[in-house]
Image: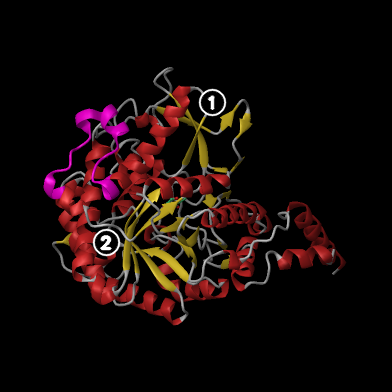
């Protein structure tokens, strides 16, 4: 007993040192109707990879055939077993106090073979049950149609996004979803981070179908100078067709909205030399303008055209017409800011995420890091970065409605449960980023919602289960979910209890 009390006191003392400075952040700083949520994606949480008629996806096959590309060699066969435990997970969300849940639909669960094989009614039934359970608890479903996974058959048939045939496949899939779920889903996004996905899949060869070529990487297949832009073009036109269909055939009667989610790092010039200033602009063009300029202005950015010449496709007049349908909002996934160094004036390693922009990204300037590093290589804690990016998007695309669809903090996974649960780093991160988002809103950005990545620890793509992003800890042997300190902090913010009341109580009792 004495030992137990001692432990509690020790823990309380540790928390007192580690806990974030009590800086007030209040829900009332955010506009009425603001969506506060948490996010996941199908492959990362669902598991049940071969159940109830689901077809194999590109990730099912990739993780089994290329386990060397995943840090711990593991896969999402079971992941969080969310397919069977979704009711328990909806309860977690309810207890958290979120009013929205961002999740993605597994294309291979709905159309195991794409258009060819017909709709899998058990797949539709699963998402029906999930959506109904959410709505019953007052939680808005915020649905992504494609979050990196698609039926494996389409990968073999079209090289996933390389063949133009994928456009019709996506259009068909999106239509099945609008028809089946659109009576209840008011927030749709076509794609999650197609800008990141095309680079990882077709430039660096890190994601399926694992294509790349020197100097960007060494793969058995691919052409890193050309394929990412062909794939991106097909993503953009698939997006445009789905938006067109939604606007023409569903929006008026279903009353929902549709957007796209783009990954957005903020790039700061490494030095104030003109070369680095231009490098930062190029990095932003290759990250953000690549997708949003065609969607908003009908053209690829000039920085890309000047560098890529004919490797960058042209939009035909018909494609331009289709692009004229405007998105209702932009989804911003933001995790980090980083310095941009020019690689034109002095050569550097191009086998990196920014290599195609001839930019080298680094977290260090004169030996000082841009922010506290996290468990993901190249991801630092720089809360002001989110304000910069929101201001930037706001100016360039004329004040569009924005949802921050992902923002979160990774910790290295270990078996010390206390260490995992007392995630002070995440609390600091969320508090800092939300404060800066609230400041961006005061500055005029139309931010309408915010989603923490992630609701719970899950399969983190090439990092497997070696890092954890969740508000809830998941024991992947027992599937037990446990609230971390950050879940309690978020709940306190959402319930208006004042941040970190529990931590303060612990502290005052010590
Ligand atoms: C993706 C998520 C991923 C997260 C953290 C985003 O790029 O959309 O699926 O888990 O970042 O790496």
Q: Secondary structure at mark 1?
A: loop
Give SS at disc 2.
Answer: helix
Residue 300 lies in the magenta-colored region = yes
Residue 223 vs 334, above or below: the answer is above
The reply to whether the magenta stretch includes residue 329 is: no
Can residue 353 be seen?
A: no
Q: Residue 469: where, in percent of width, then height?
A: 53, 55
Give percent across and percent down for residue 55: 25, 62
Question: Residue at (19%, 64%) from the top-left corner?
Answer: 245
Q: Position of residue 405 (x, y in %)?
A: 44, 58
Which one is nearer the viewer's eye here, 311 or 307? 307
376 horizontally vs 426: left or right: left
Please give the range of residues in magenta: 294-319
Report the residue marked by disc 2: 108
Magenta span main SS: helix
Which is more N-terminal, label 2 or label 1? 2
Q: Is residue 287 visible?
A: yes
Q: In the rendering, at what x and y percent does residue 342 appear?
A: 44, 24
Image quadrant containing the N terminus: bottom right
Residue drawn at x 33%, y 54% as measured from the top left: 60
For the residue pair 33 and 113, the one nearer the viewer reads as 33
In this rendering, is residue 373 above or below 282? below
Disc number at residue 271?
1
Q: Residues within 10 Å of mark 1 (few under 14, many from 20)?
A: some
């Amino acid at each position: 007993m004495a030992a137990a009390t001692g432990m509690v006191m020790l823990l309380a003392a540790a928390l007192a040192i580690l806990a974030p400075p009590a800086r007030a952040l209040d829900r009332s700083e955010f506009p009425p109707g603001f969506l506060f949520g948490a996010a996941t994606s199908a492959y990362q949480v669902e598991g049940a990879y071969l159940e109830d008629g689901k077809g194999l996806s590109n990730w099912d096959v990739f993780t089994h055939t290329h386990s060397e590309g995943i840090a711990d060699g593991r896969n999402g066969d079971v992941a969080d077993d969310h397919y069977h435990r979704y009711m328990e997970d909806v309860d977690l969300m309810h207890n958290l106090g979120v009013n929205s849940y961002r999740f993605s639909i597994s294309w291979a669960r709905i159309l195991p073979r794409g258009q060819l094989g017909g709709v899998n009614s058990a797949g539709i039934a699963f998402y029906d049950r999930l959506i109904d359970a959410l709505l019953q608890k007052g939680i808005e479903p915020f649905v992504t149609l494609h979050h990196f996974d698609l039926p494996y058959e389409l990968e073999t048939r079209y090289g996933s996004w390389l063949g133009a045939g994928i456009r019709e496949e996506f259009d068909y899939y999106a239509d099945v979803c609008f028809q089946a779920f659109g009576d209840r889903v008011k927030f749709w996004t076509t794609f999650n981070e197609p800008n990141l996905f095309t680079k990882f899949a077709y430039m660096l060869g890190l994601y399926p179908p694992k294509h790349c070529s020197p100097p960007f990487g060494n793969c058995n297949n691919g052409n890193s100078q050309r394929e990412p832009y062909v794939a991106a073009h097909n993503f953009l036109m698939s997006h445009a067709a789905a938006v067109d269909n939604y606007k023409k055939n569903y929006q008026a009667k279903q009353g929902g909205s549709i957007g796209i989610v783009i990954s957005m790092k903020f790039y700061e010039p490494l030095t104030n030399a003109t070369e680095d200033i231009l490098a930062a602009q190029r990095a932003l063009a290759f990250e953000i303008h690549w997708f949003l300029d065609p969607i908003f202005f009908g053209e690829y950015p000039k920085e890309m055209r000047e560098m890529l010449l004919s490797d960058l496709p042209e939009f035909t007049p018909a494609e331009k017409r289709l692009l004229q349908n405007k998105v209702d909002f932009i989804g911003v996934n933001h995790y980090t800011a980083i310095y941009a160094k020019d690689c034109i004036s002095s050569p550097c390693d191009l086998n990196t995420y920014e290599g195609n922009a001839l930019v080298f990204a680094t977290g260090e300037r004169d030996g000082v890091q841009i922010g506290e590093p996290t468990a993901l290589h190249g991801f630092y804690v720089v809360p002001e970065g989110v304000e910069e990016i929101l201001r930037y998007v706001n100016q360039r695309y004329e004040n569009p409605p924005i949802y921050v669809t992902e923002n979160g903090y990774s910790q290295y996974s270990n078996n010390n449960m206390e260490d995992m649960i007392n995630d002070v780093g995440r609390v600091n991160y969320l508090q800092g980023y939300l404060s800066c988002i609230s400041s961006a809103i005061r500055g005029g950005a139309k931010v309408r919602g915010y989603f923490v990545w992630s609701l719970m620890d899950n399969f983190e793509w090439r990092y497997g289960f070696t890092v954890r992003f969740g508000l809830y800890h998941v024991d992947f042997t027992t599937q037990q979910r446990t609230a971390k300190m950050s879940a309690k902090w978020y709940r306190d913010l959402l319930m208006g209890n004042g941040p970190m009341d529990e931590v303060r109580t612990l502290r005052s009792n010590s």
